[in-house]
Image (tube, rainbow, N blue to C red):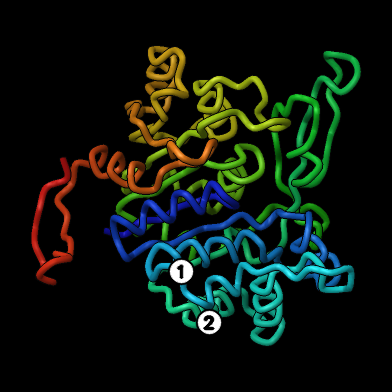
């Protein structure tokens, strides 16, 4: 099964960890609009793609596939102290070096996955750094709409985000160009995942890259939306589960999906979520997918089981005891 997951940050990490339990053919398509922390510094100083979310996707695939490997741990390690390296993740610096030496972020990411021994693939949604621009209300006068630029600014705004757009700073705000390999991955996928994650800064941006949007509309893959466990302070404070889907539809009215997965305890009014999912052509699936030991995180095993049931496909798995291939049905 060819699986493609779109997103960024910790939300994408959760999806990749679950997807890797279902198949070895997993491709991550990652947002490239981060402008904070180590990624923001490297982006501003070197003019490169922000590497942080790309690094996290590589580490997620390595951890899910191989367990806690040394290189995966090193990639995630951050330097301490007060010097120039303070706060930088090792993987960010390695990716920045590969970007500069190879001059091609896709080749660089392929080399990084070989270094980590990962069979899955990590791709940027665009090969140029992008900027998020959002319309926000509630900052002063209740009805006044202000424009806020930058992922960090939007993620931390005390206002209410209404809508976002993407800009290409290197081309004076031109239309974002999709990474061709990411488009091909979506078109050739059997299942495509959107979410969970920061809704306005990690999930929705993929729908605003025209090439990726068109691929998501055209693909014959089963499309699965995974909702967050709780609203995110700033971006989606006060959002109900169904409001997340309404915003998705507002940004991509032509998109239709097949399944919406939500944690049972996170949905106070299941009927409303079912109606919102139906507006996208989808069926809402409620299950216990939250990690019982870590608040705010999905349990990758439970999420994988839920996806398996939702897809209802034939599948092949490796018998862990005898090492023999066997055929089974996802129930």
Asked if 178 appears above or below 232 in the picture, the reply is below
Residue at image position (80%, 63%) is 170
| Quadrant in the picture for residue 171 | bottom right
Is mark 1 in CB contact (under 8 Å) with mark 2?
A: no
Whether residue 219 is visible, yes or no, is: no
Work out whether residue 319 or residue 279 is closer to the camera in this orientation and state it. 319
- Location of residue 41 by image quarter: bottom right
Q: Secondary structure at mark 1?
A: loop
Is residue 249 found left or right of 237 in the rendered image? left
Among the two numbered marks 1 and 2 on one chain, the one whose residue lies closer to the N terminus: 1
User: Which residue was labeled with disc 1?
Assistant: 68
Residue 32 can be seen, yes or no:
yes
Note whether 69 is above or below 5 in the view shown. below
Give the camera-side residue of 250 and 8. 8
Point out residue 253 in the picture as x, y percentages from the top left corner.
Answer: 52, 30
- The mark tally for this picture is 2
Q: Which mark is residue 171?
A: none
Q: Which residue is nearer to you in this view: 86 or 316?
A: 86
Residue 65 in which image quadrant: bottom left
Q: Residue at x 55, y 20 (%)?
A: 240
Going 17% across and 65% down the picture, which residue do you hit? 320
x and y percentages locating residue 182 in the rendered image: 49, 61
- The residue at 35%/59% (across/down) is 20
Query: Where does the C terminus fall, quadrant-wise?
Result: top left
In the image: residue 137, left or right of residue 284: right
Foreground mark, 1 or 2, reads 1
- Residue 145 place in picture, x, y as percent: 83, 23
Q: Whole-percent x and y of residue 263?
A: 41, 29
Q: CA distance from mark 1 to mark 2?
A: 20 Å
* Disc 2, SS: helix
Q: For residue 111, which numbered disc appears in the image?
A: 2
Q: Residue furthest bottom?
A: 101
């Amino acid at each position: 099964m060819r699986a493609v997951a779109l997103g960024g940050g910790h939300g994408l990490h959760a999806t990749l960890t679950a997807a890797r339990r279902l198949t070895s053919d997993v491709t991550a398509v990652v947002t490239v609009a981060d402008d904070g922390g180590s990624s923001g510094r490297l982006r501003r100083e070197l003019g490169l793609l922000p590497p942080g979310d790309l690094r996290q996707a590589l580490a997620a695939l390595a951890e899910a596939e191989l367990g806690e490997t040394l290189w995966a741990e090193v990639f995630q390690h951050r330097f301490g102290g007060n010097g120039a390296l303070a706060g930088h993740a090792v993987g960010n610096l390695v990716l920045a070096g590969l970007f500069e030496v190879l001059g091609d972020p896709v080749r660089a990411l392929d080399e990084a996955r070989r270094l980590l021994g990962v069979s899955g693939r990590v791709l940027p949604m665009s090969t140029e750094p992008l900027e998020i621009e959002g319309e926000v209300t509630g900052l002063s006068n209740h009805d006044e709409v202000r424009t806020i630029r930058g992922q960090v600014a939007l993620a931390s705004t005390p206002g209410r985000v209404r809508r976002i757009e993407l800009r290409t700073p290197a081309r004076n705000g031109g239309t974002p160009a999709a990474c061709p390999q990411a488009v091909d991955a979506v078109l050739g996928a059997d299942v495509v995942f959107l979410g969970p994650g920061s809704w306005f800064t990690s999930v929705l941006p993929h729908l605003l890259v025209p090439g990726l949007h068109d691929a998501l509309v055209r693909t014959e893959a089963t499309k699965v939306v995974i909702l967050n466990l709780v609203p995110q302070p700033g971006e989606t404070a006060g959002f109900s589960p169904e409001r997340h889907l309404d915003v998705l539809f507002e940004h991509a009215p032509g998109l239709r999906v097949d399944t919406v997965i939500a944690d049972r305890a996170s949905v106070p009014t299941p009927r409303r979520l079912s109606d919102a999912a139906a507006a996208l052509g989808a069926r809402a699936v409620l299950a216990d997918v939250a990690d019982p030991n870590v608040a705010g995180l999905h349990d990758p095993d439970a999420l994988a089981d839920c996806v398996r049931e939702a897809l209802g496909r034939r599948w092949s798995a490796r018998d862990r005891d005898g090492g023999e291939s066997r055929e089974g049905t996802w129930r």
